[in-house]
C-alpha cells in the first residue's frame, strides 16, 4: 500500500493499516519526541499519546501539505501540552540577559550526537522546550510565547539560558577523557 492508500484505510479504522503507518513513522516521531522529553520513557509515552491523536484525528487530514509535517505538529503539540500541564513556574528574566550566545560548531564537532541529545534532555523543561522549538523546529519567539503562554522576552531569555547551559556542558571535559589524559602522562 502506498501512503495515500494507508491514510485512506486508517480513516476507516483499519487496524492493519494503522499498524503499517505506525511502523513506517515510529522511529522518526520517536526521535522528535526525544528532543522534547527528558528521557526515553517520557518520549515513549509522548509517542504513544501522539499516535493516539494521529489516528483519532486522521480524518481531519485533507491531503494538503506533508502528512509527516502534520504528524510532527501533533507530536510537538503533545509535548507542549505535557509541558504546560507539568509546568508550575514561569520566570520573567531581565532583558540584559538576552544577548545571543554563540556555540562554535567546531568545538562541538567531536561530541557524539547522542551526547548532545542527552545534554538537551537534561535542560530544565522550560529551557528545553524553548530551545527545541526555536533552534530545532524553527518557531519564532512570538509563536513560542503563544504556544507556551509566556512573554516573547521570557522565550528569548529561556533560549539564552539554554544555550549557556549547553555551551557549558559541551565544553566541559568528561571524566573519561580527563582520566585518559592523566593515564597517558599528559
Image (tube, rainbow, N blue to C red):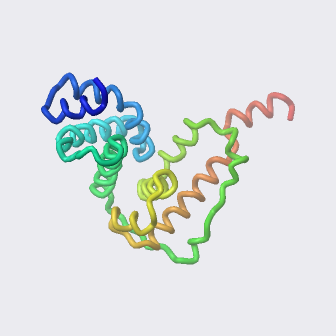
- In the image, what residue occupies the spot 53% across and 58% down? 162
x then y, percent, for residue 111: 65, 39
Q: Is 117 situated above or below 136?
A: above
x then y, percent, for residue 140: 45, 64
Q: Quadrant of the N terminus?
A: top left
Q: Is 147 situated above or below 45?
A: below
x then y, percent, for residue 35: 45, 44
Q: Residue furthest left?
A: 12
Q: Is 1 situated above or below 32?
A: above
Quadrant of residue 49 in the image? top left
Q: Residue furthest bottom?
A: 95
- In the image, what residue occupies the spot 36% across and 35% down? 41
Q: Is residue 138 left or right of residue 19?
A: right
Q: Is residue 99 left or right of residue 1?
A: right
- Across the whole image, how many numbered discs are drawn on residues? 0
x then y, percent, for residue 85: 27, 55
- In the image, what residue occupies the spot 51% across and 62% down? 159
- In the image, what residue occupies the spot 35% across and 28% down? 24
Amino acid at each position: 500500500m502506498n501512503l495515500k492508500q494507508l491514510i485512506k484505510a486508517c480513516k476507516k479504522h483499519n487496524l492493519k493499516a494503522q499498524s503499517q503507518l505506525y511502523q513506517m513513522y515510529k522511529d522518526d516521531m520517536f526521535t522528535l519526541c526525544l528532543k522534547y522529553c527528558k528521557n526515553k520513557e517520557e518520549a515513549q509515552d509522548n509517542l504513544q499519546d501522539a499516535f493516539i491523536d494521529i489516528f483519532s484525528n486522521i480524518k481531519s487530514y485533507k491531503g494538503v501539505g506533508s502528512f509527516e509535517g502534520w504528524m510532527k505538529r501533533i507530536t510537538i503539540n503533545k509535548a507542549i501540552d505535557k509541558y504546560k500541564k507539568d509546568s508550575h513556574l514561569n520566570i520573567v528574566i531581565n532583558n540584559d540577559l538576552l544577548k545571543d550566545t554563540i556555540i562554535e560548531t567546531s568545538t562541538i564537532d567531536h561530541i557524539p550526537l547522542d551526547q548532545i541529545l542527552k545534554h538537551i534532555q537534561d535542560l530544565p523543561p522550560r529551557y528545553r522546550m524553548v530551545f527545541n522549538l526555536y533552534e530545532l523546529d524553527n518557531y519564532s519567539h512570538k509563536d513560542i510565547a503563544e504556544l507556551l503562554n509566556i512573554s516573547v522576552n521570557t522565550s528569548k531569555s529561556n533560549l539564552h539560558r539554554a544555550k549557556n547551559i549547553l555551551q557549558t556542558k559541551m565544553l566541559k571535559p568528561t571524566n573519561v577523557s580527563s582520566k585518559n589524559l592523566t593515564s597517558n602522562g599528559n
